[in-house]
Amino acid sequence: MPTGECFSYHLSGRWIMSTGESSPPTQHCLHGSGFLMGYELGLISGALLQLSSILALSCKQQEIVVSSLLIGALLASLTGGFLIDRFGRRIAIIIASCLLVLGSLILILSSSYGILIVGRIAIGISISLSSIATCVYIAEIAPQHRRGLLVSLNELMIVIGILFAYISNYVFTNVSHGWKYMFGLVIPIGTLQAIAMYFLPPSPRFLVMKGNDEAASKVLGRLRATSNTAEELTVIKSSLKDEHQYNFVDLFRSKDNMRARMLIGLTLVFFVQTTGQPNILFYASTVLKSVGFQMKNSISH
């Protein structure tokens, strides 16, 4: 919890501080999305060794098992913006959490290669949609001076999730059907996140988008612990108006330096891929085994 802030909890639809005064809700339960994303990304590294043995997967099938999560993520990335604008950021996170639980159950109960692929695609859709919605939701409910910190904490949780995935791989590597335990560990976390998100308020920006200014003002009042929300509401309306000045083609134009921003983003993604980081992330255990490490001695398992 951020230094200097009192612990807050939800009671009868209002956030109350331990001192009894109105207080912003803690955003830490939102970082569970980052943790789950990192965990699911790193998990397949160790699980793949057991799955390939149990299901007698060929090299090509192993590659499809790994990449099917990315296929699901691609599908969600193409539609995620529409979904969070249509149904709301909070609802999108709840849906993503439920889909994560469903996908994990499919994986645990899977007894064939085809069902395994379906479960992995569902997980990919879940973590991609959750990643999109969470970053937007945090940015929209957090005070301006804390937005960068809270979004960065979400990125940190992704890395911590990857670490815990490798720890899980190590713990369950020599357990019979240990891969089921690896996939199943996210079920209670995903369920808890879905329940917790139900009690959090909707994004004020989303409410303004839907023309519900009164509800947005009430939410801002609870989040900022003040009744004077007119100024922030004006800023939100102004930013929404500015958005209509742009379209997809503007990403490739020099207007407001959008082209340079796009090139920087593409360059960063390009170097992430060319350095081979994703390959190490997904195939660390397989690589270590191929160079002579035994499963019981490899921490990445």
Image: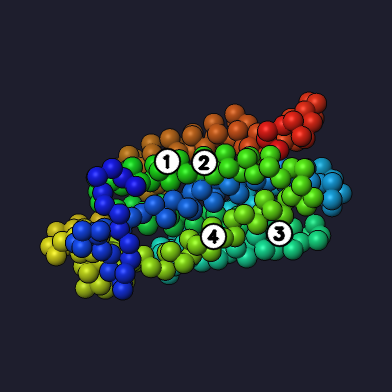
Find residue 181 and report its horizontal and vertical position in percent. 69, 53
Residue 58, disc = none
Q: Does 225 sit above or below residue 261? A: below
Separation (CA) of disc 2 from disc 1? 28 Å
Q: Nearer the viewer, mark 2 or mark 3?
A: 2
Please report the residue visible at 56 percent of the width from the left and 60 percent of the height from the top.
188
Q: Nearer the viewer, mark 3 or mark 1?
A: 3
Label 3: which residue?
107
Label 4: which residue?
190
Q: In this view, does 10 lie to the left or right of 197?
A: left
Tag 4–tag 2 contact (CB < 8 Å): no
Q: Does 277 sit above or below residue 79? A: above
Q: Dot 2 surroundings within 10 Å: few (below 14), some, or many (20 or more)?
A: some
Separation (CA) of disc 1 from disc 4? 33 Å
Separation (CA) of disc 4 from disc 2? 16 Å
Label 2: which residue?
160
Quadrant hosting residue 286: top right
Q: Which amino acid does label 2 sit on?
A: Ile
Find residue 16 and report its horizontal and vertical position in percent. 25, 63
Q: Which amino acid does label 4 sit on?
A: Gly
Separation (CA) of disc 3 from disc 1? 37 Å
Label 1: which residue?
262
Q: What residue type is labelled 1?
A: Met
Q: Can residue 246 be seen in this view?
A: no
The answer to which of marks 2 and 1 sits earlier in the sequence is 2
Q: Which amino acid does label 3 sit on?
A: Leu
Q: Nearer the viewer, residue 37 or 2?
A: 2
SS at circle 1: helix
Find residue 167 and report its horizontal and vertical position in percent. 63, 40
Query: Most extreme residue toward the right, as rendered?
Result: 56
